[in-house]
Image (spheres, helix red, strand yellow):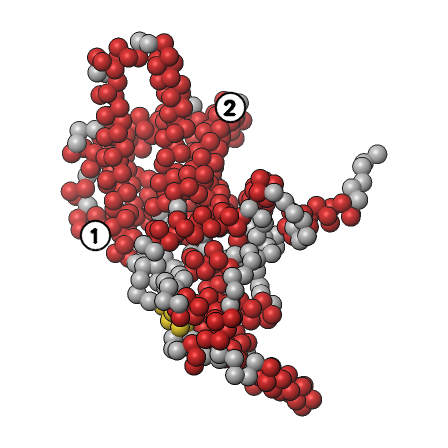
Amino acid sequence: MKPVVPAGFLSRLEDLIWGGHGVSLSVWQARGMRVVRTLLLLVRDLVDGQLTLRAMSLVYTTLLSIVPLLALSFSVLKAFGVHNQIQPMLLNFLEPLGEKGGEIASNITAFIQNMNVGVLGALGLALLLYTAISLMQKIEESLNYIWHIQQPRRFADRFSRYLSVLMVGPILVFAALGMTATVMNIETVRGLLAIDMLGWLVQTISRLAPYLLVIAAFTFIYMFIPNARVRFGPALIGGIAGGITWQTAGWGFAAFVATSNQYAAIYSSLAILVLFMIWLYLSWLILLFGASVAFYTQHPEYLYASAGEPRLSNRMRERLALSIMSLVAGRFLAGEKTPSLIELTRLLGMPRHVLQTALDALERQKLLLQSADEPPLYVPARDPSQISVAQVLATVRIAGEERFFSPAGLPAPQVVDETLERMQMALEASVDGITLRELAARRTEAPPPEQVLPGVAADNDEALTATARDAGG
């Protein structure tokens, strides 16, 4: 007989994980609950299909750009005499494919060596650069999606970053490997390795080296590619999760390839390409999975149960707008550094895109301005004594009407218009004469938002300190 789980138990469990109202948790319990939330959301993101779609898109772009991409790196490495190391690096990446991986690596290397840049011409060289850079652009778009960043970098900034990764990156990798080999061949180092304890330690590190290299590569990508300020700690956690998953998936895929003779029977000579595409897909999916881990680690305010972007109620929009204006005006009047978007996210415990919607509405009505700092700081657009609470409330109430529908375009009975007018008059009368200066003067430090678990607030404080330090504040 199939066991039946009481509905009340599931409801209490869901409230404990996602609500936590009235539940007192220690710091360690709260952090454990945060890990549970993160795992559930990672599974939800994978099931939702957006990560898998972007991984498939990256596979297609990789197939188009892998030869031009490696050709650029090959041309740079050839000047340093280490171009022969490209094939061993490809073999290491394609190791889960077994013997078929060696065949693919040989074919790709042959394509690169046969490519003659001199006969391409200016247009051909430009297409070669664009094809190579398109992969980097697609990676940035995918990581920006995970980090909820809608605005990409400026073209000049992207171009310089991409070329530095494509040309300087391989040099640094092979230089590090060469320095390691040189140090290991020094006679003094060999003598130290003869000591049992040191020799065992070096052997252990050499076994962990593949994990460490992949973790370092993933961490670098998570910090360098997204158009966001990614802290080292969350990037490292995402790199560890992605690196360990990638190495483990490599072992599992190698076992799968060893027992996949039916693929050769079905696809014949295309079996190599099919397996190569599957491994590329898994690799990109794992990279995006690690990026999601880094994102949720740095932004616990996104740990909410509902799928998709949250939609605020009218009450929440009004509360959020007044909280933002109160924080900004309070610091402005005190002569302190006003908050940036990143700091407001930490202080209010709200997702970035939710805050951005309210901030955009306040900017459009000339209640807030952005400074020229990096990152930009929000300051009152005029004297806080000239901004009323009623103006702030009206701003969030009419937000969106200029783009979509307006009350004038919605026919309503006269009794409805009269009722709404009385409500508006009552609201204005209740806050009549209260300015932003008075609101900021009465402001007291608010407790952490309810949706942030106990213990997460402490992490947010640490994150805020690190953010302020990075920004120079």
Q: CA–CA distance between discs 1 and 2?
A: 44 Å
The image position of residue 363, as x and y in percent, is: 42, 73
Identify the residue shown where x is 48% and y is 25%: 251
Can residue 137 be seen here? The reply is: no
> Can you say whether 181 is above or below 307 in the image?
above
Image quadrant holding the N terminus, namely top right
Neighbour tally class for label 2: few under 14, some 14-19, many 20 plus, Cα within 10 Å: some
- According to the image, label 2 marks what residue? 255
> Can you say whether 261 is above or below 288 in the image?
above
Q: Which mark is residue 76?
A: none
What is the residue that sits farthest to the right in this orientation? 1
Identify the residue shown where x is 36% and y is 57%: 152
Image quadrant holding the C terminus, namely bottom left
> Can you say whether 6 is above or below 360 in the image?
above
Can residue 6 be seen here? The reply is: yes
The image position of residue 379, as x and y in percent, is: 38, 69
Which amino acid type corresponds to the residue marked 2 in the rendered image? Answer: Ala
- According to the image, label 1 marks what residue? 123
> Which mark sits nearer the N-terminus, 1 or 2?
1
Identify the residue shown where x is 52% and y is 80%: 434
Does the CB distance between marks 1 and 2 fall below 8 Å?
A: no
The image quarter containing residue 178 is top left
Which amino acid type corresponds to the residue marked 1 in the rendered image? Answer: Leu
Neighbour tally class for label 1: few under 14, some 14-19, many 20 plus, Cα within 10 Å: few
The image position of residue 259, as x and y in percent, is: 53, 23
Could you say which is closer to the camera, residue 110 or residue 16? 16
Give the SS element for disc 1: helix
Could you say which is closer to the camera, residue 119 or residue 72? 72
Identify the residue shown where x is 48% and y is 61%: 353
